[in-house]
Image (cartoon, rainbow, N blue to C red):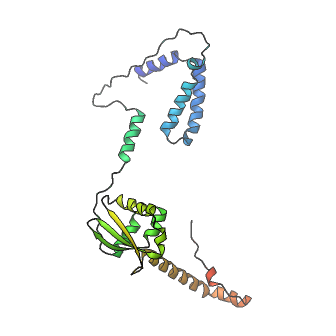
């Protein structure tokens, strides 16, 4: 510790009562334990300081006789190296970091030519739950002058609320800010992504059931106990 810092510490020690020092010490110990429960370390630290101020003897002992005390004034030291900037307040640093984390909407231009490209785009964008389910039942129709037109399987038309359509457009506009969206309903002229996923899932499940039913041990058990396995009861185990 250099002489300047040591002098500041000595000045603080001369101007704090034993009572306040004990209370502040206990608050610091308990505050560190509660730090993990705070939204951020900065907020937790600030709450510790507020508690210390609230329990300061000069603020709470209103009936006590005023005593003569020395006023502690600490003047910030001028940095010896002018090229180094003095540290900024914690609040200002946090606000700067939050500003940096805000990502502006992209002005990229969407380019689509067919259903395969549309399905690839669907899987690359983070849609909300209801919008994600519905968007898989759409077919690419056209993209003209940054206006995307889709065809929704008409059996899901009742799920196409204004809220869901707005949610779909909002997700698309995170990457393509100038995009406009039109969704029409009709009988699908080809398989949608949802239909392809369902078909692939059924085929996979069928192969699992076939492998189970043709297993030698399973067949021996069926013969021994004169029983039959219900194919619909065979399901794939998924890990969570």
Question: Vertical placement of 96 versus 78: above or below?
Answer: below
State the image quarter where residue 35 is shown. top right
Q: Is residue 128 above or below residue 85?
A: below
Residue under the image location 53 percent in, 29 percent down: 50
Picture quarter with the C terminus: bottom right
Q: How many labels were placed on the picture?
A: 0
Percent x, y of residue 14: 51, 15
Q: Between residues 54 and 48, which one lies in front from this camera angle?
A: 54
What percent of the width, then of the height, locates residue 48?
Answer: 54, 31
Report the residue that reaches farthest toward the right: 225
Q: Residue at x 56, y 81 (%)?
A: 208
Task: Give the left or right position of residue 164, taking residue 218 as reference.
Answer: left
Residue at 51% x, 34% y is 45
Q: Residue at x 39, y 37 (%)?
A: 93
The residue closer to the viewer here, 51 or 212, is 51
Residue at the left extreme, as displayed? 145
The picture places residue 197, in percent across and down from the top left corner, at 46, 76
> Image height check: is 98 above or below 158?
above
Query: Based on the displayed image, in which of its 4 quarters is residue 76 positioned?
Result: top left
Q: Nearer the viewer, residue 58 or 144?
A: 144
Is 127 or 98 nearer to us in this picture?
127
Q: Quadrant of the N terminus?
A: top left
Q: Is residue 200 above or below residue 112?
A: below
């Amino acid at each position: 510790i250099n002489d300047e810092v040591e002098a500041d510490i000595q000045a603080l020690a001369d101007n704090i009562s034993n009572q306040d020092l004990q209370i502040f010490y206990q608050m610091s110990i308990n505050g560190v334990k509660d730090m993990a429960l705070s939204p951020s370390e900065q907020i937790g630290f600030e709450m510790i300081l507020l508690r210390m101020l609230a329990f300061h003897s000069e603020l709470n002992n209103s009936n006590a006789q005023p005593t003569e005390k020395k006023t502690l004034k600490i003047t910030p030291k001028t940095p010896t190296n002018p090229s180094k900037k003095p540290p900024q307040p914690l609040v200002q640093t946090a606000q700067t970091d939050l500003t940096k984390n805000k990502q502006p909407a992209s002005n990229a231009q969407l380019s689509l030519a067919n259903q395969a490209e549309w399905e690839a785009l669907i899987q690359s964008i983070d849609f909300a739950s209801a919008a994600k389910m519905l968007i898989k039942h759409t077919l690419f129709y056209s993209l003209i002058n940054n206006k995307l037109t889709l065809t929704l399987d008409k059996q899901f038309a009742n799920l196409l609320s204004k809220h869901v359509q707005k949610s779909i457009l909002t997700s698309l506009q995170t990457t393509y800010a100038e995009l406009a969206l039109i969704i029409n309903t009709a009988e699908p002229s080809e398989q949608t992504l949802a239909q392809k996923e369902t078909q692939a899932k059924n085929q996979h499940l069928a192969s699992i059931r076939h492998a189970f039913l043709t297993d030698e041990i399973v067949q021996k058990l069926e013969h021994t106990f004169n029983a039959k396995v219900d194919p619909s009861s065979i399901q794939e185990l998924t890990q969570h």
